[in-house]
Image (cartoon, grey):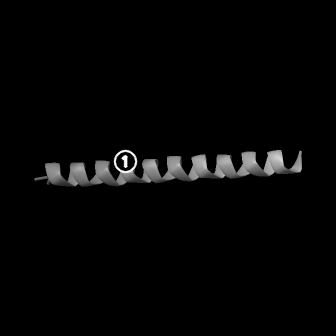
Amino acid sequence: MPTYPSPFEYLLAFGLVFAAGVLTSVALRQYGDKIRREATAHA
């Protein structure tokens, strides 16, 4: 008989993926701001 993951495991997986997405979004935004500042400083 197969065992199925509990709802808590689904919630945990969703939370981890959501947190990774938020961190990636914040990091890309900060990197874009850094590139923009450097581009205007060298222009």
Relative depth, front residue between 19 and 32: 32
Relative depth, front residue between 41 and 12: 41
Relative depth, front residue between 16 and 4: 16
- Residue 29 lies, in percent from the top left, at 59, 46
Crowd class of label 1 (few under 14; some 14 to 19; many from 20; radius 10 Å): few
- Residue 37 lies, in percent from the top left, at 74, 49
Q: Residue furthest left?
A: 1
Residue 4 visible at all: no
Which amino acid is tagged 1? Phe
- Residue at 66% from the left image edge and 47% from the top image edge: 33
- Residue at 47% from the left image edge and 53% from the top image edge: 23
Quadrant that contains the C terminus: top right
Q: Is residue 38 left or right of residue 1?
A: right
- Residue at 88% from the left image edge and 50% from the top image edge: 42
Q: Secondary structure at mark 1?
A: helix
- Residue 38 lies, in percent from the top left, at 78, 52
Q: How many marks?
A: 1
Residue 25 visible at all: yes
Mark 1 highlights which residue? 18
